Each structure stands twice: as C-alpha cells, then as structure tokens.
Amino acid sequence: LRRVIYQMPMGRKGAALELVTDVAKERGYTFTMLSSTPGNDQTGKVRLEPTDAPIGDVLITQRHVPGRADVSLRVSAAGSEVTATLCGVSATASVIDGGADFVLSVPDPVLWWPAGQGAQVLHDLTVTCG
C-alpha cells in the first residue's frame, strides 16, 4: 500500500492510496487506486521501461558576450557520451571519468528580463546520455 501525491489542474494537488500487486521488474506492476466511495476503485497497470544510461548532476554556467551566449555544461553520467540541445544548438561530448564537459554557443539569444522590464523567456535544455 502506498500513498501517491499527484498534480492537478490549477496548481492543486491530489492524493490517493494505491494497493500495489504483481510486481515484476521487467514487466512493471499492477495497482488498484482505492476510493473512499465503495465500488469506485480504479485498477490499472504501470509498465516500467529502462531508460538510457542515467544522468546524475547537470551543472550549467553561462557567459554573455555581444551577439552570443556561451552555455557551459558539466554532466555527471554513466554512459559513453552525452548530448545537449539548447535553442537549436546541439553538442555531443564523451564521458570521461564519469563526466562530460562542453559548451553550447547560442547566437543572438532571446534574453530573460526582470519583472516589469521585458519578457521572461524560458528556453528548454535537453540532455540525453547513451
């Protein structure tokens, strides 16, 4: 039996009790979500899938120069290489002694401004290891 906290719309959180059964590492597990209303229980199955080699810490620093931002990455990983993508710029680095270091040079980045002084633009950084 485990308690699950989940995110709901509008920033609210919900909670449920799940009775976990039939656990098999290679197949996942079966659960029954226990309801406070009789006859309203929900049953499902969760399949666990292996991921690529695990990524540990990602340390990010940035340096801005006119017309470009240099984003340095130090990634702790267990795989053979790490790839990162930011604003359409990608780079791949070999993992040496448990880590990979590289720099993404982003030309003319759209910058984030403090509240009231401009847009708070967010950029997605994708890091994969394999």
Image (cartoon, rainbow, N blue to C red):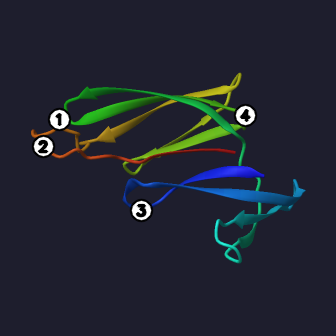
Give the mark nearer the N terminus: 3 vs 2.
Answer: 3
The residue lying at 18 percent from left, 38 percent from top is 113
Identify which amino acid the numbered label 3 is placed on.
Answer: Pro
The residue lying at 64 percent from left, 26 percent from top is 99
Is the residue marked by circle 4 packed among few (<14), some (14-19), or many (20+) residues within 10 Å? Answer: many
Rendered location of residue 102, percent (x, y): 51, 30
Give the mark nearer the N terminus: 4 vs 1.
Answer: 4
Q: Secondary structure at mark 4?
A: loop
The residue singled out by tag 3 in the image is 9
Q: Are marks 1 and 3 in contact (CB under 8 Å)?
A: no
Identify which amino acid the numbered label 1 is placed on.
Answer: Pro
Depicted 71 relative to depicted 123: above or below: above
Give the mark nearer the N terminus: 2 vs 4.
Answer: 4
The residue singled out by tag 4 in the image is 78
Depicted 110 relative to depicted 35: above or below: above
Looking at the image, which is closer to me, 43 or 104?
43
Residue 49 relative to residue 115: left or right = right
